[in-house]
Amino acid sequence: MAEAHADPNKDAPYYLVYWHVIPGRGEHIRLCFAEAGVPYSDTAFTEGGMDTLHGHISENNTGDEENPPPFAPPILKYGDLVISQTPNILINEVHNCHHPIAIDLHYEDQKEECLRRVKDWVKHRLPKYLGYFERVLAGKASGEGPLLYGGVLTWADLVFFQTLDGTTYFFRKAVAAARKSGKYERVFQHYEAVKARPRIAEYLASDRRQKYSNYGVYRYYEKLDVEPEE
Amino acid sequence: MAEAHADPNKDAPYYLVYWHVIPGRGEHIRLCFAEAGVPYSDTAFTEGGMDTLHGHISENNTGDEENPPPFAPPILKYGDLVISQTPNILINEVHNCHHPIAIDLHYEDQKEECLRRVKDWVKHRLPKYLGYFERVLAGKASGEGPLLYGGVLTWADLVFFQTLDGTTYFFRKAVAAARKSGKYERVFQHYEAVKARPRIAEYLASDRRQKYSNYGVYRYYEKLDVEPEE
């Protein structure tokens, strides 16, 4: 477990409530803060942070006058405002590759099904998503240059960067093959462009950027790191 | 297949692009229009509608100056604006109950895995979701009466109604048992309240409300209609 320590930003007005140890879904929000250069407090790095988190998602929490109870982290507090949830189908699909039968069961209890799902996912879904974003980037609405919409960085660029980064961690052979194929040049240019933004690069190199692990959305199991079929 | 016919609203400024035959994800949007009393055109009911739909999601579509290409229906056109996607984790989870291994494979190719997943879903995930919304409805932010937020109908109420309606179609035994348990009284009051709104009721009784079928997000397979375990 990552060690909780005094958070230098503990008095910042933005307060992210998210699990420690994994980057997970909280990472999209962290990337937004990093790019904006806005300080924020983070339960993953705050003493007692996990108690705070469990308080938010406790079955006894019914929220307050202005805020319904959050269903799940990531949760963002700003003054009296509490917002939550970053649903994302791509994230979910990748996550389900190690939980096809049940989110509550461990990978070890559904190994064969995982392999069957992963082979299909790499063959059908990965090129579908990469092809889609290649198309977005080729479209006029994306503007000049590497970003998704209007030539201006939006949260969508950061979310896309993070999902591709996580997918690359999970499916390193398949993503490497996709990259080598030359079919998704704009996608990988986008990835590199976001990664190279000074504040993002600084963040990624820092201790605030947690490593992927087999507790998270994006995992690595050698047996699931399949070669794409021809 | 539902028969395409001349759409009486074909000149309406709102144009919904969605598959015919299934209510699917397009249904959330249809419910919003129904409640607002706003006429809209719908590819499911328009001659040539499926050609229009396939044009939008064609691999050759890169969008235009203002709009990236949509990834998938539902797609909404309003004048020059094209918006798309209603990602919803709950919808996805239920849908995955008949596609645990691969969205591209038929139910018949993953029957055993479906049953294993469904048993787990009914035991763990269904009560988790119902319990969560019961908590939202019990919270102060929901306001007086049956709605999710501030006592005022929002799109969230309609989405929640539709997901519960579809889940009830899929898991009739499990949802009936949940209702009978008395643990989720607010949830089912919410459901009935939305269903009874005059415009929603009128819409639900009309031919525009398509039936669930085994092509859709919400299906019925007798073998998957499991009794919840004690």
Image (cartoon, coloured by chain):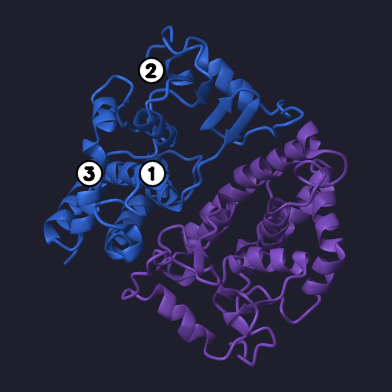
Chain colours: A blue, B purple
Between the C-alphas of marks 3 and 1, the distance is: 14 Å
> 10 Å neighbourhood of mark 1: few (<14), some, or many (≥20)?
many
Q: Nearer the viewer, mark 1 or mark 2?
A: 1
Q: Nearer the viewer, mark 3 or mark 2?
A: 3
Q: Position of residue B224 (x, y in %)?
A: 60, 62
B149 vs B197: above or below: above
* B185 lies left or right of A37: right
Q: Please name the residue that numbered disc 1 is placed on.
A: A159
Amino acid type, residue under disc 1 in the picture: Val
Which mark, by number, is residue A193?
A: 3
B98 vs A188: above or below: below
Amino acid type, residue under disc 3 in the picture: Ala
Which mark, by number, is residue A41?
A: none
Image quadrant occupied by the N terminus of chain A:
top left
> 10 Å neighbourhood of mark 3: few (<14), some, or many (≥20)?
some
Residue A85 visible, this angle: yes
Amino acid type, residue under disc 2 in the picture: Met
A209 vs B207: above or below: above
Q: Please name the residue that numbered disc 2 is placed on.
A: A1
Q: Secondary structure at mark 2?
A: loop
Taking depth in this image into account, of A34 and A153 the one nearest to the observer is A153
> 10 Å neighbourhood of mark 2: few (<14), some, or many (≥20)?
few
Q: Residue at the location (38% across, 12% down)? A: A3
* B213 lies left or right of B130: left
Q: Earlier in the sequence, mark 3 or mark 1?
A: 1
Taking depth in this image into account, of B39 and B17 the one nearest to the observer is B39
